[in-house]
Image (spheres, helix red, strand yellow):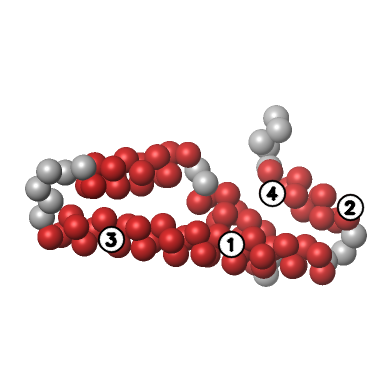
């Protein structure tokens, strides 16, 4: 059975991958600066901003969930071990 805390942490890490954030910002910038946008593009900009806000809310809620869960779980040593496992080979 998987650990939802670890899954939530992996999801948060993926939200902040530089390439996906850059692409989303570029798309929003291109659509906003279009001289004569069609109705679908206007709707898309609105939906993308809504998505960004919802993702921020999800991120905040997940951080709270992770924080609460980490405080309730075992010792500091166990928490450090779990964090090390999440980082994988990042330090190598």
Secondary element at image label 4? helix
The span from disc 4 to disc 1 (Cα, nearest Å) is 19 Å
**On the image, which quarter does residue 26 sit in?**
top left
The span from disc 1 to disc 3 (Cα, nearest Å) is 21 Å
- Taking the image as shown, residue 39 lies to the left or right of residue 29, namely left
- Between 55 and 77, the one lying in front of the other is 55
CA neighbours of label 2 inside 10 A, class few (<14), some (14 to 19), many (20+): few
Which circle's residue, 4 or 3, is located before the other in the chain?
A: 3
Residue 60: numbered disc: 1
The residue carrying mark 4 is: 86
- Between 55 and 78, the one lying in front of the other is 55
In this view, 17 is above or below 82: above
The residue carrying mark 2 is: 77
Which circle's residue, 2 or 3, is located before the other in the chain?
A: 3
Mark 4 near mark 2, Cβ–Cβ under 8 Å? Answer: no
Residue at 67% of width from left, 67% of height from top? 65
The residue carrying mark 3 is: 46
Residue at 47% of width from left, 39% of height from top? 18
């Amino acid at each position: 059975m998987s650990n939802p805390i670890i899954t939530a942490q992996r999801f948060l890490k993926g939200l902040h991958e530089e390439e996906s954030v850059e692409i989303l910002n570029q798309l929003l910038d291109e659509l906003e600066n279009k001289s004569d946008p069609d109705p679908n593009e206007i709707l898309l900009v609105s939906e993308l901003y809504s998505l960004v806000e919802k993702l921020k809310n999800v991120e905040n809620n997940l951080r709270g969930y992770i924080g609460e869960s980490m405080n309730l779980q075992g010792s500091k040593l166990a928490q450090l071990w779990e964090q090390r496992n999440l980082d994988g080979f990042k330090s190598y």
